[in-house]
Amino acid sequence: MTAAVGARPARAAPSAARLRAWGRGAVGAVILVAIILQAGAAPFVRGLAAVSVPSVVAALLLTAAATAAAAWRWRILAGRLGLALTWPQAVSAYYRSQFLNTVLPGGVVGDVHRAVSHGRSVSQVAQASRAVVAERTAGQVVQIGLAVMVLVALGMSAYAPAVGIVLLAVVVACAGVVVAAAVSTRARDVVHRELDAVRTAFGTVGTVAKVVVASLVVVAGHVATFVVACLAVGVDAPPQRLAAVALIAVLAASIPFNIGGWGPREGAAAWAFTSAGLGAATGLAASTAFGVLAMIAVAPGAAVAAASAFHRRRATRAAAVEESS
């Protein structure tokens, strides 16, 4: 009886995580449906029709570079936390996580799977989860900082509200952590423990520099892919304006309230393109083309996921045969 009771939380945790992911996906679906009802299907059809072989090849190459940089960032921080992670493991697992993030709601399921899978392989799930959280958080911080610097340098004051909203959300989240730590001893202990892990992960100037460089390559790869999508749909605008709208759209794509990456990205693209004088319909078409290119570019992750499932099934059968004998 005791074992059964103890097993319930273990089963409940994944269920709660799945429920949160589906909830975030539902929010993204509502946003996307609202945009379609407002703008109609024509911009989306235009974006789909714009996808071509050259744009797909470009997206595959750019995503490969971004994935390699992200895997390098992950390896750096995992190593700092004492976790073994080979280069092939990091690249293949990152492709798989991107694929899962693209096809599953919420936009974070692949990262959760990557953390748990790596953690089980080294028997340190909690530490592996910290490495993934640190890696993704570092990427977001660099992305936001880069967006602010580029938009300020270009004098794109019209986009200040969008970046301001993101920064406000970050400040509110940090304030929530501080308040929780102040009113709860348990929360305070958790915060101290996690801050110690952060200090360990980013403990040297060299580590921070490598993580920043890797993150810049990742952002550049995604922004360049969005620019490819813009060119595919025939957007005629100066390079700096394309860079600005691409930064806004890519930043919005990282918001974890989406369905396979769709939702906030389209809304942000429509608004950014309107602010740049390019039209909301053009922004939706470019965002659609980007979404399709992104899905194709992470397709290698599907092969990795299939191979992982096959190996797990084979291992389970082998264990069952061994038990029966």
Image (spheres, rainbow, N blue to C red):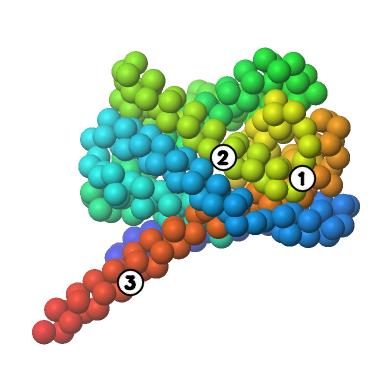
Can the viewer see residue 266 in this picture?
Answer: no
The picture places residue 282, in percent across and down from the top left corner, at: 81, 45
* First along the sequence among labels 2 and 1: 2
Q: Is residue 128 left or right of residue 9?
A: left
Callout 3 touching callout 1 (CB < 8 Å): no
Q: Is residue 230 left or right of residue 108?
A: right
Q: Is residue 194 left or right of residue 87?
A: right
Q: In the image shown, does 280 or 182 lie closer to the viewer?
A: 280
Front disc: 2 or 1: 1
Callout 2 touching callout 1 (CB < 8 Å): no
- Identify the residue at horizontal 18%, vertical 82% (top origin): 321
* First along the sequence among labels 2 and 3: 2
Callout 1 crowding tier (Cα within 10 Å): few <14, some 14–19, many ≥20: some
The picture places residue 38, in percent across and down from the top left corner, at: 88, 52
Q: Residue furthest front?
A: 54
Assign a secondary structure to mark 2: helix
Q: Amino acid at mark 1?
A: Gly
- For mark 1, what is the residue? 234
Q: Amino acid at mark 2?
A: His
Assign a secondary structure to mark 3: helix
Can the viewer see residue 274 in this picture?
Answer: yes
- Identify the residue at horizontal 28%, vertical 44% (top origin): 87
The picture places residue 115, in percent across and down from the top left corner, at: 37, 48
- For mark 2, what is the residue? 222
* First along the sequence among labels 3 and 1: 1
Q: Amino acid at mark 3?
A: Phe
- For mark 3, what is the residue? 310
Q: Is residue 143 left or right of residue 152?
A: left
